[in-house]
Amino acid sequence: MSRTLFLIDGRYQIYRGHFGMRPLTNSAGMQVQAIYVITDLLLRLCRDLDVSHWAVAMECDGPTFRHQMYDQYKANRDAMPEELRTQLPYIDRMLEAFRVPILKSDHHEADDCLATMSRLAEAKDMDVRLLTRDKDLEQVISSRVQFLDEKNWNLYGPDELLEKKGIRPDQVISYQTLVGDSSDNIPGVAGVGPKTAVKILDHVEDPFTLLNDPVPDGIPASALKKVRANPDAMTLSKELVTLSLETPLQQNPEDLARIEPDHEALADLFRELGFRRFLKMLEPAEKVEADLFSGFDSPPATAEPTRQKASTAIAEKVDYKYVDTFEKLDAVIEACRSEGRFAFDTETNSLDSIGGFAVGCSIAVQEAEAWYIPFYSPTDNCPLPKEEVLERLRPILEDPSIGKIGQNMKFDAQVMRTQGIEIQGISGDPMIAAYLVNSLRGRYGLDDLVGERLGHSMISIKSLIGSGNDQISMDQIEPEKITEYAAEDADFTLRLSDNLRKDIDDNDLARVYDEIELPLIEVLTSMEREGISLDEKRLSEQEETLTEELNRLESEIHEEAGGPFNIGSPKQLQKVLFEDLKLPTKGLPKTKTGVSVKAETLEELSIRHPEQILPITILRHRSLAKLLSTYVQALPQHLHPVTQRIHTDFRQTVTATGRLASNRPNLQNIPIRSEEGRRIRKAFVPNREGCIFVSADYSQVELRLLAHLTADEGLLQAIHDGVDIHASVAARIHGKTHEEVTKDERAAAKAVNFGLMYGMGAFGLSRDLSIPVAEAKQFIEDYFQQFPAVQSWMEQTKLDAAKTGEVRTLYGRRRPVPEILSRVAREKAQGERYAINSVVQGSAADMIKLAMIEVHRQCQLEDRDCRLLLQIHDELLLEVPIQEVENCRQWLRDAMIHVMDLSVPLEVEVNTGKDWFDASK
């Protein structure tokens, strides 16, 4: 599921707080209700909606560009009351203590900041929730950008806008232009109210077309007269109500990730303002319940499910020890052996597990008791020699019968590999456990989880190393001073693991946790540590080839356009396509600046006008330019200075379906559809001489899983026949033999086979195959007639998800689908798509992870020297000595096809090559 950005309209919330509730004064007699409401909102967002990204938009200091345009803009507004103005400095301090990013831009209003950031976030595949009631912002509403009611968390999107006002989001500017806004002193069209405006917009997209003849039928004569009476006022109104989508902002959407608040600053503010109830939230032993805000006119409790509270109170006294003798170290080791498990955490001088080093580790075997074992001191007075400490720890760390628990244990395992120790027997990772319990949460940091589930505020690392220009690293701190911080991490990792284990068991997630995700940590640790080599010379040659082709395409584009222009400028491209070439725009998606020139539009234009080569040529130019900048030029920057290899970060807690994500760099997104994209793989070569790559790729795994899940006789038979499955499906639909199936019929069958799992409908199929919607609809109907059990399974899956709010994979992985419970039709449909897709794709994710675990185990056998390097969707890439290749082919295929017992056979394609490109053919 995509990330969600919560954007708060600061001015609206401040005024809502001050005027929307009865006056609230503190002991000093100062009114504080605006501060209180803002604080309440921020706390509830954190508590109820698990915010991962947020920001507050504030008004700029001084006049805006609208005041320069119209000196009467907002001239009728009363000055801010003094009792509200005195609260503003405290609101600023409160936002700073919460560490909420502030959106603010000179000469622009908060609305402009919100509109611009909304569009930026949408482009980054994020959902946006606007906490505002400002009607101007209705113009940025979309399926992904919606208003959020701060009282009950209800959404207000395109459907609600249409129901309330009778208009679509793309009509909001025209609507506001006609009706004006008395609160902002925007004139609009005199005598035109909401009903008349809707009536006008039912017949014209742009009210300015009414200034000229002919006039469409249905426009009331009186309305036409009013529109034509003052065109200047209408022009001015449109300029005033149109929000800027290019407001200069200092942040990008990714910069708005929520971070831990400054608890000390919040506590000081709460005491100063007399917010005793809020203050109790910061007291570890006194976690308050849902009645936190009782006694004030605060918004009602959310209807969302509340989070689980800590099952036990946090111990007030802890025993954290500094290990400075071998006697103490031996006692720690003996405690670990006696208990049979322990929580483990490393302290390092860097987040680079290969280039950095460990300065110490902490261990806990029971609640409220932990030890810090130093490896290093900046003043060379470390009490124990590092080498001997590590040798004494080695037996318990490498003993698989002693369980190890760690928060993000993969990192600690990599750190210890740098020290020459391979951690075995990983039995718990709270980060992964929390992800399995709720894969939509998005943030699984120790501090957040401990605060939420155990009611404890962890020691901030900034208290040790500082921040900003004054920040230092752990290796610059005397080890004794690290003890409390490090020991607390181990202590609460253990507590959190036990707390989450109950949820794992109660939610029937033990199988996927114990048999897939935990064993996978060791596999990923090995893969990431090994890395993969890159032939920079090959990339340099590709860069030269791509640059030449881009230059050629640019010349061709300019020649077709009749002259040079900036290909990367949407405005200039709009002019070339729709003004110079006069391509029809009917039915094409619109933006605030005109007709969209995104890829979908260019593809549509190339279909409508096959004689016009400009759209398809621009698409190719864009594709090659992205390849050049994103991969060919960027990949060498990811070579590690120590190993001269690429060490991608495989992340287990990112996707809602359970698939692994790849980061820094993302090797899973290297394009494979184009020849140029595939050739990037030629630059990836084996690490060791005498080795080649062996690639093993599941064939049509999701389609085979669909056949198993649905038990559809026709689909099962098509797979068991062992022939071209897409041609087989097409043959059944059209009543033909395999030999009679045409290329187009097979392509349509393939599109439906895979599209169904992603919620593709008739419109999507028609677009993909360039066929009429009616024909696509008929094809889908024919498909379901031939494979009725597929449709029955899909419908039953939707019904089950609507009852439980979740779906499960074959292995029991849970994916919540809250959207399916929505009253908004579009969101509900999205939830239904998630439900179908998550079962199939999630089961495929479980399968490839099980395959990785088994393949890694096979690689570790004494008589083998194979190494698993990469996982890309349904493909595994191994580095194998040439003399072992034939043997590897056999055991690799056998290992992968037997990881799951299905009613259909699994197929694995195994290929070899001297580089990744050749191995993946």
Image (spheres, helix red, strand yellow):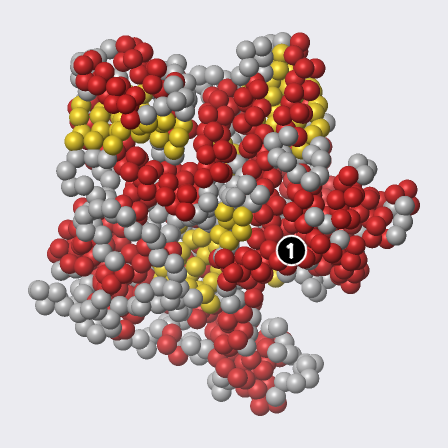
Please give left or right for residue 595 compared with residue 157 in the image. Answer: right
Please give left or right for residue 159 compared with residue 49 in the image. Answer: right
Residue 759: give x, y in percent of width and height: 64, 54
Residue 848 in which image quadrant:
top right
Along the viewing direction, whichever of 175 and 187 lies nearer the viewer: 175
Residue 224: give x, y in percent of width and height: 59, 85
Please give left or right for residue 589 compared with residue 161 in the image. Answer: right
Q: Is residue 368 visible?
A: yes
Q: Residue at x 38, y 52 (%)?
A: 51
Q: Is residue 837 above or below residue 387?
A: below
The amino acid marked with disc number 1 is Met
Q: Residue at x 29, y 26 (%)?
A: 339
Q: Is residue 849 above or below residue 240?
A: above
Residue 700: give x, y in percent of width and height: 70, 38
Q: Residue furthest bottom?
A: 222
Q: Quadrant of the C terminus?
A: top right
Residue 781 in which image quadrant:
bottom right
Q: Residue at x 82, y 43 (%)?
A: 727
Q: Residue furthest left?
A: 28
Q: Is residue 195 above or below residue 821?
A: below
Residue 225: give x, y in percent of width and height: 58, 87
Along the viewing direction, whichever of 654 and 373 lies nearer the viewer: 373
Which residue is tagged 1?
Answer: 794
Q: Residue at x 58, y 82 (%)?
A: 199
The number of numbered discs placed on residues in the rendered structure image is 1
Q: Is residue 471 visible?
A: no
Along the viewing direction, whichever of 893 and 555 lies nearer the viewer: 893
Q: Residues within 10 Å of mark 1 (few under 14, many from 20)?
A: many
Along the viewing direction, whichever of 87 and 274 lies nearer the viewer: 274
Q: Secondary structure at mark 1?
A: helix
